[in-house]
Image (tube, grey):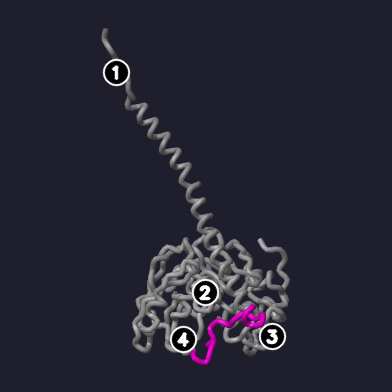
Amino acid sequence: MRRYRRGFTLIELLVVIAIIAILIGMLFPAVQKVREAAARMKCTNNLKQMGLGLHNAALDRDSAFPPIGAKLSATDVQASSLGRVLLPYIEQDNVYKSYDVSVTFADPKNATAIATRISTYLCPTTPNSSRMITGTTAGGLAYSAAPIDYIHGNQITNNSAVISEMTAYNPTLYPGTGNIFNNVAGDWNTVILYNTPRKFAEVTDGLSNSFMGVYEIADKPNVWRAGKLFSTPTTNTSGTGSWAADGGNSPRSYTADGSTAPGPCPFNCSNSAAIYSFHSGGANFLMGDGAVRFLPQSIDKWVFYALMTCHAGEVYGTLP
């Protein structure tokens, strides 16, 4: 009796391969969405930890949030950065104690401390999260420092074009005269200030209605515009992008291509001097009460500006 061998024909094999390819194609976007959701959650948790740390720091200072960009003691030779202030409140007390405030961040005495990578300071969506911030200070000290993807910004902006635009929009709220960013009222400032502690009672717009002043400006000192890497600086004398030295920023809005300020895009269009994340469609924001909100990139920039201030009295309605 003749026996016949059964097997796949070429056509059957091609059909199976095609079906598998279709299934993979359907599955891949779902996997990407899950990864993005997980990364966004990790970023949210990072900001929540920083918010809790700032509130604990405030409780240690008679219900006043610590200033960023100020010398916190008589022995400090360099203004504080957000990353250094938060260390003892995010379980990094050993790094905090090893940092010598009597010398600059780039001094060899601080080489080990500033090179310590701190996961709370890194957003998982940042393309170059494994980078080190390297450079030489104006005083000739070479350094290699661990990065931070979050930064402190205590005011809307100090860009004259933006000030003029805002004054034209609402001259009562934004008079544009005098030293409007550091006046006694501080109408244009976020919860966290440069140089001066901020008491809870001073936040008359409400902590839940005001940005804390901690945002993502990811992958510094590299320059990104509208999702594309624009340039990679070869000189960095100030430690921009490192948790040890990056003292702050004054966020502004940009044109859609990220080339010019002011513009209609409040964030994710440029990380030169604006809030910038690698999350799809928006960015995470730390509020004054420690909550974290994910706001869409399509948010009206005047709502965005209103959230930047903590006692200017703007009314912006319901957040998206």
User: Sequence order check: which comes first, mark 1 or mark 4?
Assistant: 1
User: Sequence order check: which comes first, mark 2 or mark 1?
Assistant: 1
Q: Name the residue rendered at 38%, 68% in the picture.
A: 131
Instruction: Report how far apart the C-alphas of labels 4 and 3 lie in the structure.
Output: 31 Å
Instruction: Report how far apart the C-alphas of labels 3 and 1 lie in the structure.
Output: 89 Å
Q: Name the residue rendered at 60%, 70% in the picture.
A: 52
Residue matched to label 2: 151
Q: Nearer the viewer, mark 4 or mark 2?
A: 4
For the N terminus, which image quadrant?
Answer: top left
What's the magenta region?
Answer: 59-75
What amino acid is labelled 4 in the image?
Val
For the C terminus, which image quadrant?
Answer: bottom right
Residue matched to label 4: 101
Whether residue 84 is visible here, answered yes or no, is yes
The spot of residue 314 in percent (x, y) is 71, 74
Element at label 4? loop
Label pair 3/1, CB-CB below 8 angstroms? no
In which quadrant of the rendered view does residue 17 lie?
top left
User: Sequence order check: which comes first, mark 3 or mark 2?
Assistant: 2
